[in-house]
Image (cartoon, rainbow, N blue to C red):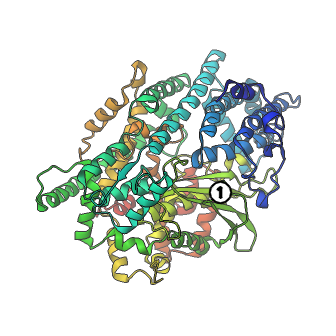
Amino acid sequence: MTADTARDLSEGTEPGHGNAAANPFDAAEWATPFGLPDFAAIRPEHYVPAFAHALKRHEAEIAAITGNAEAPTFANTVAAMERAGGALDRVANVFFNLTGSNTSPELQAIERAVAPQLARHSSAITLDPQLWDRLSAIDPDAEALGDEERRVLDRYRSRFRRAGAGLAPEAKARIAEIAIRLAELGTQFAQNVLADERDFVLPLDGADDLAGLPPFLRDAAAEAAQERGGAHGHVVTLSRSLIEPFLVFSTRRDLRALAYAAWTRRGETGGETDNRAVIAEIVRLRAERARLLGFESFAHLKLDDTMAGSPDAAMELLRNVWKPALQRAAEEREALQALVRAEGHDFALEAHDWRHYSEKQRRAEHDLDESEIKPYLPLEGMIQAAFDTASRLFGLGFEELRDVPRYHPDVRTWLVRDADGSEVGLFLGDYFARPSKRSGAWMSAFRSQERLNGDIKPIIVNVMNFARAPRGEPTLLSFDDARTLFHEFGHALHGLLSDVTYPLLSGTAVSRDFVELPSQLYEHWLQQPEVLRAHARHVTTGEPMPDALLERLLAAATFNQGFATVEYAASAIVDMTLHLSAAGEDGLDVVAFEADALRRIAMPAEIAARHRAPHFAHIFSGDGYAAGYYSYLWSEVLDADAFDAFREAGDIFHPQTAQRLRRTIYGAGNLRDPREAYTAFRGRLPSIEPLLKKRGLAA
């Protein structure tokens, strides 16, 4: 980024000037089908002036609220705040979606400049004493506010209070400084991880390097090589959908070790992309912020406004799962070590061996071969399975749109309609890995549902990183890939089905340890014979998956769950321990801290945490899941119990239960406290037993 570009942003260059002539963000609305962003017209140079103009506009809107001489009311303060900032949301939604899914050096430079600007702007609003006074003065009883209005007011007051609105001026100034610096560090962390992922390739040259790889994996490695210039015939990248099957199938133990080391040491390679110092500063600043706000630790701050309520409650859940998972993992380890010996080897099982020998064990126990399963799970078939499930549960219909704007040729778009034919919103699917995309899978929104500013329909996107088959051939998924697709589509439905008036409450804007319930619950339908018999069809013949194979696949649902639970829970425990600690005060050696935390819980040497700290984007590229990675497990307690509601009704598509689920969970946004929301669906709060049974950790 040039100094001129940074100066343009800070000084507020107007759209339509200089290099940004005919800025697409000038228009009040996109002149495109369904109001999709005009991706073809948007260029990197448009963002800086568009952000500057939108920031100025939002500042003026807030100033009009604080300068209102009338007594504070819900309408002239809260509703006015909800109407403000639309232009800024419009620019930011496009920009940050693209920095995750289709970035470039130009976008990354802009991101480094704009992230602290946005943090400064946000802090100026939440720390504004006049706004805080107005929010505090509103009397919901005197105004006879409805339930949704009371919830919005409560959420605004909580947000401002937790941002430091009630602090002394000196503390407010420091809170604002911390927010700006954390925005810079989070951006740096994410870009460092992406750089390590983008730059690594493991060449596979010759038959020896390809030993053990089934045809689908050789094809994917060949396609990845072509996408990276074709210097090698096949390559392994750090895309999870490529490296994990490589670790499963490759019989070259030396290459598995190389690939695994690269995968687990992202962000820890030394040089400009090393994240260890970044993490130390993030942890220190988070701890300082928590103290300024009157909390014992950052973990206490984060969990004070969650369903769990406290770090103790979250850690109790993790401990209750950890002990049986550790015991199960020890049994799995002994079985795998026996396989190593049976093959005539004398080495001790290591982390880069686990997936390889676990697949052999699965074949032995369940007569399952991933290469036998994948032809029945083509990407197209699994997309249709997710759509059909939504149709049967909620009456939704999906019509693919061909001639609409898209930010990358891979992106597909569907118009989603309700049972009565009315438009629900748009769903975008971006399924394949590429160097311009960060790893993982996620749901996001280009536009969120609300009714305050008109009948606004959502535009929701799912982003995946599946390994693409060679051009012209269908992409085949593993069962884990298919589960990921269903998981993210569950998030998408949470956004699509949102039925609220106020933007603050829309869709997935719920407590962090509640947000995974709709996604994890949706995974259950993939594992039902009724769904698999209808949609798991051979990619060539169209024949359904044979009953014998289907039965073996479902019987293996709890296979290797000791490993899976340990690798997840280890990351969650490290996250919580780190954010309960003051280790960052005197300079944190995060790798040593992580190793000590794992030693104290007796982490098996043969299993690595699912996310090691130097690349743990969930908790360090922003604070969304910081001190909150436990949320997946907390939500799993809910989803295991929630699906039982359909079992108890005797129909996995039971209409009345599905209608109640849509009304209280998928469509309700943040209309009520998550405990109340869950109770409205289930009639009670859940217990942990269905989770332990689901994971095979209890009888």
Residue 671: give x, y in percent of width and height: 66, 51
Rendered image quadrant of residue 585 = top left
Q: Secondary structure at mark 1?
A: strand
Q: Is residue 692 visible?
A: yes
Dot 1: few (<14), some (14–19), or many (≥20) neighbours within 10 Å? many
Q: Viewed as shown, does residue 128 lie left or right of 410?
A: right
**Number of dots carrying numbers:** 1
Kindly identify the residue that appears in the image at 50 percent across and 71 percent down. Answer: 474
Which residue is the site of mark 1?
460
> In this orientation, which residue lies closer to the viewer: 693 or 266?
266
Residue 255: give x, y in percent of width and height: 28, 50
Residue 438: give x, y in percent of width and height: 52, 47
* Amino acid at the residue labelled 1: Ile
Q: Is residue 141 visible?
A: no
Kindly identify the residue that appears in the image at 40 percent across and 28 percent down. Answer: 581
Residue 107: give x, y in percent of width and height: 63, 39
> In this orientation, which residue lies closer to the viewer: 698 or 217?
217
> In this orientation, which residue lies closer to the viewer: 144 or 464?
464
Q: Viewed as shown, does residue 155 lie left or right of 487?
A: right
The quarter of the image holding the N terminus is top right
Q: Viewed as shown, does residue 615 lie left or right of 683?
A: left
Q: Is residue 50 above or below residue 116?
A: below
> In this orientation, which residue lies closer to the viewer: 665 or 624?
624
